[in-house]
Amino acid sequence: MLELLGDSARGCDFALVRLRVEGDRIVDADADGLERPLVGLTLLEAAAVGGETLPVDALANALAPAFHAPPSATRVAVAMSGGVDSAVALIRAAPDAIGVTLRLWLDPDGPDAERACCSPDAVLAARATCHALGIPHVTLDLRDEFRRAVVEPFVRGYARGETPNPCVRCNGRFRFAELVAFARRAGATKLTTGHYARIVEHRGRRLLARAADSRKDQSYMLATLDPRFLDTVDFPLGAQTKEATRAEARRAGLLSAERAESQEACFLAGDDYRSFLERRGFDAENGLVVDEEGRELGRHDGYWRFTAGQRRGLGVSAQEPLYALRSDAATNTVVVGPRASLARTVLEVRGRMYVSAERVSAKLRYRSPAVAATVSGGEGRLHVDLDSPAFGIAPGQAAVFYEGDVVVGAGRILCDA
């Protein structure tokens, strides 16, 4: 016999749910405010029960730690964010679908937490979408795990003078590892998400590829996703445009059809990363802005406020435009110079190739065009020679290598060779 307890509160309102479970079936329940009794239901069936917001939330919190379901050849787990993309992925997977939403850590002092894809309101919206279709929904509270796996490395990266990309770490590693594990626990054969990417056969392997809609393509953010997961994962929206997705949602009468896009780096909760780092203990310590020869040009209030390629906010003036070239965490120094000094043709990457490839297109920032390159090396460290200079390469950012539209390797930029 297993006893499960869940609660939920907003303001002065509070709800508590107690369940006793034998096997996978509820044998006793203390739960008011739900639309139907829970006794006799399986955990899977209970996850589809709606009702008043707080009791349903309390029920979800009770179910999540122990949730499991027997295997089903047709069941699909759908990662739900509360937005339109995952809602359309859900209706594609119905009727034998189960929604799952990750509740992740958000900076409580951020100004706009509700825009984040993992906010409490986003969780409620995702659950409501599932329940409106009679589909079970499970919320996994991974706030502590997310903080350790994504937020803390982000902070440590800036402390080293890097410009880390937390979305690559979250999407490519943390998020999918948790979702695939949940899909197995839920007895699902597939995990579906609303990401804009495709999975293709390439040189004898299933690999990630760019989405058909280049404006929404998320293959860069997903590039570190282990190819071993791709037999389980499906991206049903990868072959269509965002406009087509919204039109499909409107035809289905989904409330999320007009929901705004979620922001990047969701844990910042709508804030600037500089303010976030200040709250994490980064001091506004006065330091030098110097040129490439070490001559002092000005002062700054924290090396971590600057990233390679930055032009605005340097606090210095010169006859030609100056850019941040690099930051030295050890000396709290920012080095600036002309744009030509940003040019790099060689870099080192900690990562791996998914298939053997030398000639690739290397994408070195999310919003930067790819550059033709040659990749060599191995054992977790790759040497990259670019055919033409790239500007504003920043240690800590992701390097993603493509053959055509297919992701054949990825890693984290370390430094110039």
Image (cartoon, helix red, strand yellow):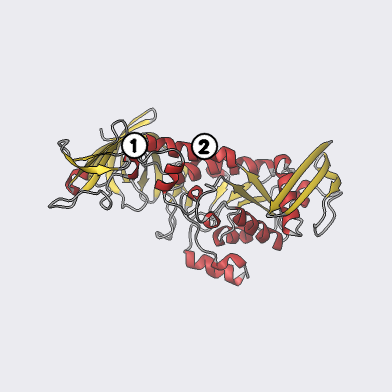
The residue lying toward the viewer, choosing from 404 and 332, is 332
Left or right? Give the position of 100 relative to 338: right
Query: For the point 34% across and 48% down, which residue is it?
Result: 365
Left or right? Give the position of 164 relative to 389: right
Query: For the point 60% across and 72% down, which residue is it?
Result: 251
> In this orientation, does residue 168 appear?
no
The residue lying toward the viewer, choosing from 394 and 311, is 311
The residue lying toward the viewer, choosing from 172 and 352, is 172
Give the distance between the C-alpha atoms of the residues marked 1 and 2, in whole angstroms.
19 Å
The answer to whether 64 is drawn above or below residue 381 in the figure is below
Near mark 1 (Cα within 10 A), the count class, few <14, some 14-19 or many ≥20, is many
Residue 415, position as x, y percentages in the image: 30, 35
Task: Identify the mark at residue 281; answer none if there is no mark.
Answer: none
Which is closer to the viewer, label 1 or label 2?
1
User: Which amino acid does the dot numbered 2 rest on?
Assistant: Ala
Query: For the point 75% across and 59% down, which residue is it?
Result: 52
Q: In which quarter of the view is residue 93 placed? A: bottom right
Name the secondary structure under disc 1: loop
Left or right? Give the position of 68 relative to 250: right
Left or right? Give the position of 303 relative to 261: left
User: Which amino acid does the dot numbered 1 rest on?
Assistant: Gly
Q: Which residue is mark 1?
A: 161
Residue 115, position as x, y percentages in the image: 52, 57
- Which mark sits nearer the N-terminus, 1 or 2? 2
Q: Residue furthest left?
A: 319
Q: Which residue is mark 2?
A: 149
Q: In which quarter of the view is residue 155 placed? A: top left
Near mark 2 (Cα within 10 A), the count class, few <14, some 14-19 or many ≥20, is some
Quarter of the image with the C terminus is: top left
Query: For the point 51% across and 63% down, which residue is it?
Result: 260
